[in-house]
Structures are given as structure tokens and as C-alpha cells.
Image (cartoon, rainbow, N blue to C red):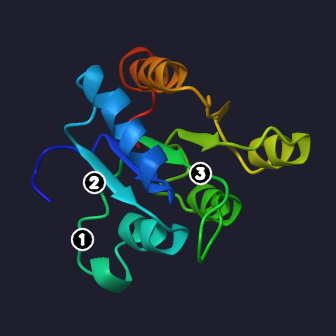
């Protein structure tokens, strides 16, 4: 990892959805400083500089976390819970990006501290538009504290 600030941490286990997400962000020049993991455990190791990422400068946190709900090893709810419980990451915006429209999943995400919950559109163009607009909002319009 270079000294370039990390912009987006994408945690998505579906390779097709991950590719579409990166593509949508790239269409808006938002994918230059993106890191992708396909399971929740690896994402947390990265965020907190443990396991395979021992020694990583954990002061360099993403400006945005895009987090799928259904993940292997550690699901999105557990990842979100740990992000919110840590002083270093508690203010990082987390957007749940899920296929689930289940009210219990939406409520759980907000109860755990999600900043937004977006249901992935099933059509290609809709997916590109929603993810692109979301990236622009969270990286350029939204203001976060300097923690």
C-alpha cells in the first residue's frame, strides 16, 4: 500500500458484484484508492492491522466502507459491530450494500450503526448508477470528522 490515502474499503464476496461495484466507482473516478476483500475476517484484519496485515499503519483508515451483509467467515453485521466498537474506526461511514430487502436485515444494520443501507439493483445500468451516485455522495458531498 502506498502513502496515497485509502478511499474505499469494499467487502463483497460475490466476484460479479465486486467487479460491478469497482466498475461503477471507476466510471466516476472513485476507484483509484480502493481495497477489496471477500470476507469479513480479512477486512477486520486489514482495518486493525492484525493477522496478515500485522504492522500496517492503522492510522490510515478508509473514507468509506462498502459492506455486504452476507459474507463468509464473519458476516457484515459482525464486521459493522467491530468497526463501531473501535475508537479508530467508529466514525468511518459504512454503507451496507446488500441484495436483501428483509426488514430485519435493514433494521439490524441501522441498529449496529450503518450510515446507509442500499439494496443492490438487479439490472446492470441501475447497479452502475446507484453505486456511482452513492460513491460521489460519500466521498465528495458528505463531511466526516477528522479523527
- Residues marked 3 and 1 touching at CB (< 8 Å): no
What is the CA distance from the residue labelled 1 to the residue labelled 2? 9 Å
Q: Is residue 110 above or below residue 43?
A: above
Frontmost residue, 75 versus 128: 128
In the image, residue 33 above or below residue 86: above
Q: Position of residue 123 (x, y in %)?
A: 57, 26
For mark 2, what is the residue?
Answer: 60
Element type at mark 3: loop
The answer to whether residue 63 is seen in the rendering is no
Q: Which residue is mark 3?
A: 68
- What element does badge 1 sit on? loop
Q: Quadrant of the C terminus?
A: top left
Query: Residue 97 sits in which quadrant?
Result: top right
Count residues near mark 2 (Cα–Cα under 10 Å), then give few for <14, some for 14-19, many for 20+: some
Nearer the camera: disc 3 or disc 2: 3
Mark 3 and mark 2 residues within 8 Å of each other at the beta carbon: no
Q: So how many labels did they put on this image?
A: 3
The residue at the point 54 percent across, 19 percent down is 126
Q: CA distance from mark 3 to mark 1?
A: 24 Å
Q: Earlier in the sequence, mark 3 or mark 1?
A: 1
Image coordinates for residue 33, horizontal then vertical, percent: 22, 42
Residue at figure coordinates x 62%, y 31% from the top left = 122
For the N terminus, give its image quadrant. Answer: bottom left
Q: Would residue 112 be seen by someone viewing this image from the given angle?
A: yes
Residue farthest along the right direction in this orientation: 104
Mark nearest the camera among 3 and 1 is: 3
Reading the image, the residue beneath label 1 is 56
Amino acid at each position: 500500500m502506498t502513502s496515497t490515502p485509502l478511499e474505499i474499503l469494499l467487502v463483497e464476496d460475490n466476484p460479479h458484484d465486486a467487479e460491478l461495484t469497482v466498475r461503477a466507482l471507476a466510471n466516476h473516478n472513485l476507484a483509484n484508492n480502493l481495497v477489496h476483500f471477500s470476507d469479513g475476517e480479512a477486512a477486520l484484519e486489514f482495518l486493525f492491522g492484525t493477522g496478515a496485515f500485522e504492522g500496517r499503519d492503522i492510522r490510515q483508515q478508509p473514507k468509506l466502507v462498502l459492506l455486504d451483509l452476507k459474507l463468509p467467515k464473519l458476516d457484515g453485521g459482525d464486521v459493522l459491530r467491530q468497526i463501531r466498537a473501535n475508537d479508530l474506526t467508529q466514525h468511518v461511514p459504512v454503507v451496507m450494500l446488500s441484495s436483501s430487502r428483509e426488514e430485519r436485515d435493514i433494521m439490524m444494520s441501522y441498529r449496529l450503526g450503518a450510515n446507509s443501507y442500499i439494496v443492490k439493483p438487479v439490472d446492470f445500468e441501475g447497479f452502475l448508477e446507484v453505486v456511482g451516485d452513492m460513491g460521489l455522495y460519500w466521498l465528495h458531498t458528505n463531511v466526516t470528522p477528522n479523527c
